[in-house]
Image (cartoon, coloured by chain):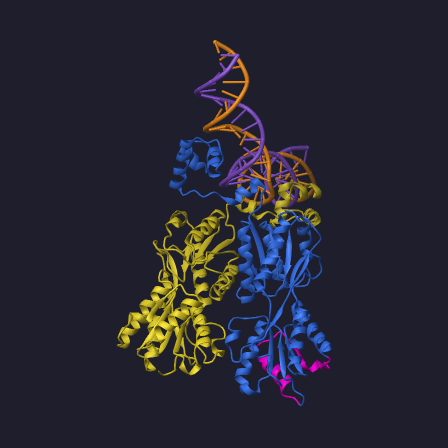
Chain colours: A blue, B yellow, C orange, D purple
Amino acid sequence: MNDVARLAGVSLKTVSRVVNGEAGVHPGTATRVLAAIDQLGFRRNLGARNLRRGSSTGTIGVLLEDVANPFYSIITRAVEEVARQYDRHVLTGSSDEDPERERELALEFCARRVDGLLVVPAGLRHGYLVPEIHAGLPVVFLDRPAGDIVADTVLVDNLGGTVEAVAHLARHGHRRVAFLGDAPNIFTANERLRGFREGYARAGLRFDEELVVMGPHDERTIAEALRHTMLRPDPATALVTGNNRITVLVLRALAALTDPADRPALVGFDDFELADLLNPPVTVIAHDTAALGRAAAELLFARLAGDNSPPHRVTLPVHVIARGSGEKHP
Amino acid sequence: MNDVARLAGVSLKTVSRVVNGEAGVHPGTATRVLAAIDQLGFRRNLGARNLRRGSSTGTIGVLLEDVANPFYSIITRAVEEVARQYDRHVLTGSSDEDPERERELALEFCARRVDGLLVVPAGLRHGYLVPEIHAGLPVVFLDRPAGDIVADTVLVDNLGGTVEAVAHLARHGHRRVAFLGDAPNIFTANERLRGFREGYARAGLRFDEELVVMGPHDERTIAEALRHTMLRPDPATALVTGNNRITVLVLRALAALTDPADRPALVGFDDFELADLLNPPVTVIAHDTAALGRAAAELLFARLAGDNSPPHRVTLPVHVIARGSGEKHP
DNA sequence: GTCGGCAATGACAACGTTGTCCAGCGCGGG
DNA sequence: CCCGCGCTGGACAACGTTGTCATTGCCGAC
């Protein structure tokens, strides 16, 4: 900026006025300054600006498990969209379900003075955020609640979803339904399992612990879980899968292992692209993923705008999309 | 930091020494300082630090079309991974194919003093980046080249891919192959079209302009394009689709419109999840998307490390994955 | 002719941090 | 007893920008 001032033959302050579009600069002077800026390729340093003005950095941080997972990338996009409306940019970080990594990223983002933080928690302990929150940093948790602090949270109705799934299968005559869920230390996996039991209870079915196989899952454990639940004297006739990744693993395993006619009925938690084009099309418990991201972001910006009501806890609805795989009779 | 110093009863500078782990501070003093830091929830301001040290901001910017598109989210993740190895964070921005938006985002990121920029170009004019590049900002373009400047670029072999696709279909007896591509002003769409023609030439087939329908495409235009190429006296017996989105649109349209037995052979550019589970499984021209992101990021960090050889232009290979849809005979 | 007022410009401090340099202090050797 | 050295701590400037306030010059009004 000094160089610009020298080249234009004005003071530093006048250049500052020009780049900020302040009134009270002679048009001729302004033109000279702009020419100098152009000639030197000057670009003002936003870091210094924010430091001096004590104003916001214009960024928010988003912490999630893995940007490459479609579930999270849809959220990221939705957040970006909202952020744009409020003139902010987005710093993303993938925690890979590692609480330590999440913590590092969060504190790093704080040191960069993000205006707010959206977190899909990986761990259960978030005490490290308490000083930040007290210092006025708005934090919204999404998809999963924070482990040990009370804060704004946006969830989907995990429990209600699997209750619905079991009810749906029971309506189609299934009495033995298996559940393949993610690692039980993950909040959503646990909630969905609770809903699964609850669904059994409401449908008046006899629950059998043997039909539940929790993760973490990969190709091998899924194949094992299928054998365990399907190849037994009293096999499951239907499956509920705990998230989109597991659903896909199951579909692939079933395609490799069994004759289409022998396949169990299937309801998957989370909708996914092409579910409607598979054979049979896959019945899912769907929720509006983009809406989840939007809701969390809107909540964050409401806080930034000064809303200091007690922490909200929003639960978004889910619904069954019947496509075929879940309507097969035993 | 002042408050910490006061609370610990030391000078500002001593606190600075402690947070930077510099030698020459009495252990007892250091402990007192750390306690004060903890008590006050102090977090050093990286913006101010970078300003003072004139050092890097530790961020790189990534500009792409849409983070929610799996193609780009895989790239984003790969870049994040590499960035992490080099201790950087990632600022992302979706341009939505809007050159003006891309420009705004790029300049905004420059003002934030990112250490480098990865760009999937939306527009054809990138002159606005020249001053930045001259000022030493490394910029790497990926998936598409910059319009009017020479710079590091990482591409996939678009032309070779569609040449292969046509050859593959010709080997299975097809003489009339249609191409449904994206908007022709998009570099990749155009290259793929060129490859398509080239493939015709190499296979010794007579090219027919009527079998090419370029986008942008949506549900409606795809249905129209299918009617146009398939319902005619000399219909196409096979299709090449220009990217993953178009492939999915076509699959959905074909599922709705036609009897499976009547469907044309199909080869899609870009692999996609579940392609192997469809009926029939979809033959694609695949490339390693994560490798694309990694290569671009590695190139960027090489520049940051001081490599100033002339601009590179890397082309990553593609290969046909035969799954069924492309091996159907006419 | 003087003065008030306004428009344009500039000098200076400050944002939070770190690099440079100097001061105090205790201690051992001459 | 004094000098110098090593170790610890502090004062000050600077990074690039902007807010505050002062200065300059000019015009019109009394």
Question: Quadrant of the rendered structure where residue B10 is?
Answer: top right
Identify which residue is drawn at 61% across, 83% down.
Answer: A226
> Where residue A235 sits in the image (x, y, percent)?
65, 87
| Near-viewer residue (A109 or A30) | A30
- Can residue A104 be seen by looking at this rendering? no
Whether residue A214 is in magenta: the answer is yes
Q: Quadrant of the C terminus of chain B?
A: bottom left
* Image spot of residue B31 (x, y percent): 69, 49
Q: What stretch is highlighted in magenta?
A: A204-232
| Residue in front for this viewpoint, B248 or A129 | B248
Q: In which quarter of the image is residue A230?
A: bottom right
- Above or below residue B58? Residue B231 is below
- How many discs mark residues in the rendered view? 0
Q: Where is residue B228 in the image (x, y as percent from the top left)?
A: 35, 72
Residue A105, above or below B240: above
Left or right, A61 with reference to B34: left
Q: In which quarter of the image is the N terminus of chain B?
A: top right
Q: Residue at x 48, y 47 (%)?
A: B111
* Residue farthest along the bottom direction in this orientation: A233
The answer to if A284 sits in the magenta stretch is no
Q: Is residue A236 left or right of residue B245?
A: right
Residue at x 58% of width, y 60% of height = A293
Q: In this view, does B99 lie to the left or right of A321?
A: left
Q: Where is residue A117 in the image (x, y as percent from the top left)?
A: 61, 54
**Residue situated in front as seen by the camera: A257 or A169:** A169
Which of the pair B32/A315 is nearer the observer?
A315
Evaluate whether residue A328 shows in this view.
yes
